[in-house]
Amino acid sequence: MAQQLVKIRDLKPEDMRAILDIEYRCFPDPYPLSLLHNLHKMHPRGFLVAELDGKVVGYVIGVIRWGFTGHILAIAVDPPFRRRGVGSALLISMLDRLRASGAREVRLEVRKSNVGAQRFYSKIGFVKQEEVPYYYEDGESAIVMTYKYGAR
Ligand code: ACO
């Protein structure tokens, strides 16, 4: 249902506070505001937000590395708005944008314990590649997942 109502658009500077609020609600190790600002300065087209009824309810950050590899740095949807297709709409829009910018594949890291997000990525077409031990500051492993265009 939300998929019909959700609007995916570029981040505006005034959205940064809403993104920060969602980031702190969703991650044990949130990106600080300074890092988000720097990322946005370096990658102005790397941020997409999801708006429902005029409210920012989610965002995705994706960048291109080495000219041909997309990298999803973060995606989050405010808890009350999950399981309505908002995350999928954000991720698919970012995959389209990265492909248009030259990406041949897209990768990401996700906490090993974050099985829900891994299922979410698998449903879109990402495949588990490897486990990277001690990837996060608290010692948890990351699961690297990749998406090859043509998979969906
Ligand atoms: N458990 C199992 N399957 C899930 C889950 C879950 N928690 N969330 C989504 N899925 C699967 C389901 O198959 C779902 O379809 P269904 O609802 O019809 O069953 C499908 O993915 C699509 O889900 P969406 O509704 O599009 O996803 P949502 O808007 O809920 O956003 C997200 C998913 C972004 C992972 C959200 O749960 C979230 O913000 N989590 C906290 C932050 C997070 O973990 N982000 C990813 C970390 S890794 C990184 O950022 C690089």
Image (cartoon, rainbow, N blue to C red):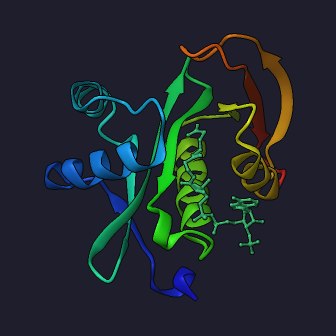
Q: Please state which of residues 77 and 15 is positioned toward the viewer in this rendering.
A: 77
- Side of 30 where 130 appears, left or right: right
Could you say where residue 39 lies in the image, as x and y percent from the top left? 31, 28
- Side of 11 where 103 appears, left or right: right
Residue 83, quarter of picture: bottom right
Residue drawn at (37%, 58%) of the image: 49
Q: Please state which of residues 54 and 82 is positioned toward the viewer in this rendering.
A: 82
Could you say where residue 66 lies in the image, as x and y percent from the top left? 56, 16
Question: Ligand 1 quadrant?
Answer: bottom right
- Side of 26 where 15 appears, left or right: left
Q: Is residue 19 above or below residue 106?
A: below
Residue 29, quarter of picture: top left
Residue drawn at (50%, 39%) of the image: 74
Q: How many marks?
A: 0
Q: Please state which of residues 116 and 126 is positioned toward the viewer in this rendering.
A: 116
Could you say where residue 28 lies in the image, as x and y percent from the top left? 48, 34
Residue 51, quarter of picture: bottom left
Residue drawn at (70%, 34%) of the image: 104
Q: Quadrant of the C terminus?
A: bottom right
Q: Is residue 25 above or below residue 136?
A: below
Q: Is residue 90 above or below residue 125?
A: below
